[in-house]
């Protein structure tokens, strides 16, 4: 009876997360789910992104985790963590836009109108030189800033919101703005969105609640952890177009990573990269090629 009740609760949780038509997700054991999922984690100030990723790894006692988009130690907010084989899918999420809310301090008195005007020059395509302490090569790079606006101004402190292309340095935007207005620097920063993950998601979780869920999972209660986990095959549908394996295709050969022919899939997506499914079962990710009868080759095969 207890197992039956637990399954009903799991079913309701999955329906809440949008799995009402996914029978496979209802049946998937937690031991399998945990090896191909993501966690939308609220990173606290203090630890590095790598340390947070390692914390998740050891708490769940799994072999591999990774994080999507590095946050500086003092920056808080959305830090998606990939688990197990889902680590190989990170690149498909990381290149999406990021959104931040932060506090900037200007060094000299400036009117709200003038500050808005100067900030508007940092929207659109901008050129940045990564900070000295950055791990990436310090070459000038072009990035798109879709939004850099004031939410509130109190004295010299400015609450702002920024919606930017991946790889944009918000701290650098603040300091570069400062060169135009007599000085400015960033005081605080919080990421509120990374790719498809936001701080308003139902499964957004802080480290404390994650640790509690992980402990309960290891003690035999999987329900709190199921509320947190985002199945990778469901997440990938939000960043890539999908197509279905045709009935004529040889599934065994597909799972070995063989290229796709026109007869292998029901339709050819317009985009260059797409995810392949058989009903609700995720099979892999492919990119289109123009090689005679071959229309696509595998980048990732899930078998």
Image (tube, rainbow, N blue to C red):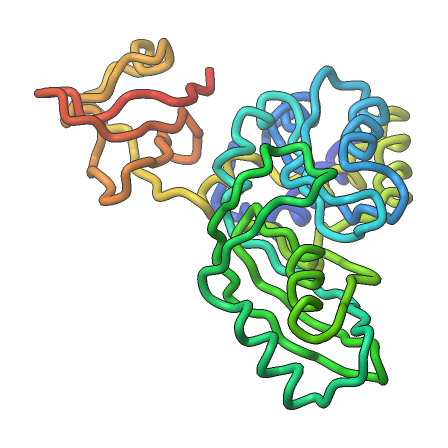
Image mark count: 0
Left or right of 222: which side holds 272? left
Q: Position of residue 116 (x, y in %)?
A: 62, 82
Left or right of 79: which side holds 123? left
Task: Compare residues 76 and 224 and report the one nearer the observer.
Answer: 76
Q: Position of residue 162 (x, y in %)?
A: 62, 65
171 in relation to 28, above or below: below
Picture quadrant of residue 176: bottom right
Taking the image as drawn, is residue 179 in sight? yes
Left or right of 232: which side holds 294? left
255 in relation to 198, above or below: above
Task: Compare residues 57 and 139 and report the one nearer the observer.
Answer: 139
Taking the image as drawn, is residue 1 in sight? no
At x 69% / y 59%, what residue is drawn? 192
Q: Position of residue 35 (x, y in %)?
A: 65, 23
292 in relation to 150, above or below: above
At x 52% / y 62%, what residue is drawn? 145
Task: Compare residues 64 and 11 and report the one nearer the observer.
Answer: 64
């Amino acid at each position: 009876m207890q197992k039956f009740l637990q399954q009903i609760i799991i079913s309701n949780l999955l329906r809440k997360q949008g799995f009402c038509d996914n029978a496979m997700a209802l049946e998937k054991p937690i031991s399998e789910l945990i090896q191909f999922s993501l966690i939308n984690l609220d990173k606290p100030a203090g630890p590095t992104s790598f340390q947070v990723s390692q914390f998740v790894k050891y708490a769940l006692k799994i072999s591999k985790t990774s994080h999507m988009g590095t946050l500086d130690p003092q920056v808080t907010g959305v830090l998606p963590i990939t688990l197990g084989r889902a680590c190989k899918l990170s690149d498909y999420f990381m290149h999406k836009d990021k959104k931040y809310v932060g506090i900037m301090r200007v060094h000299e008195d400036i009117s709200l109108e003038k500050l808005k005007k100067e900030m508007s020059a940092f929207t659109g395509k901008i050129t940045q030189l990564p900070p000295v302490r950055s791990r990436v090569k310090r070459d000038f790079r072009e990035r798109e800033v879709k939004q850099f606006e004031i939410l509130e101004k109190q004295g010299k402190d400015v609450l702002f919101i920024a919606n930017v292309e991946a790889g944009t340095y918000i701290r650098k935007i603040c300091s570069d703005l400062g060169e135009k207005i007599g000085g400015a620097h960033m005081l605080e920063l919080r990421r509120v969105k990374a790719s498809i993950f936001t701080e308003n998601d139902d499964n957004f979780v802080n480290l404390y609640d994650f640790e509690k869920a992980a402990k309960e999972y290891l003690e035999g209660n999987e329900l709190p952890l199921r509320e947190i986990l985002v199945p990778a095959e469901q997440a990938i549908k939000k960043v890539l177009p999908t197509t279905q394996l045709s009935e004529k295709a040889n599934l065994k050969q597909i799972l070995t990573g063989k290229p796709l022919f026109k007869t292998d899939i029901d339709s050819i997506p317009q985009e260059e990269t797409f995810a392949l499914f058989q009903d609700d079962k995720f099979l892999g990710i492919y990119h289109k090629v123009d090689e005679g009868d071959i229309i696509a080759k595998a980048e990732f095969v899930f078998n």
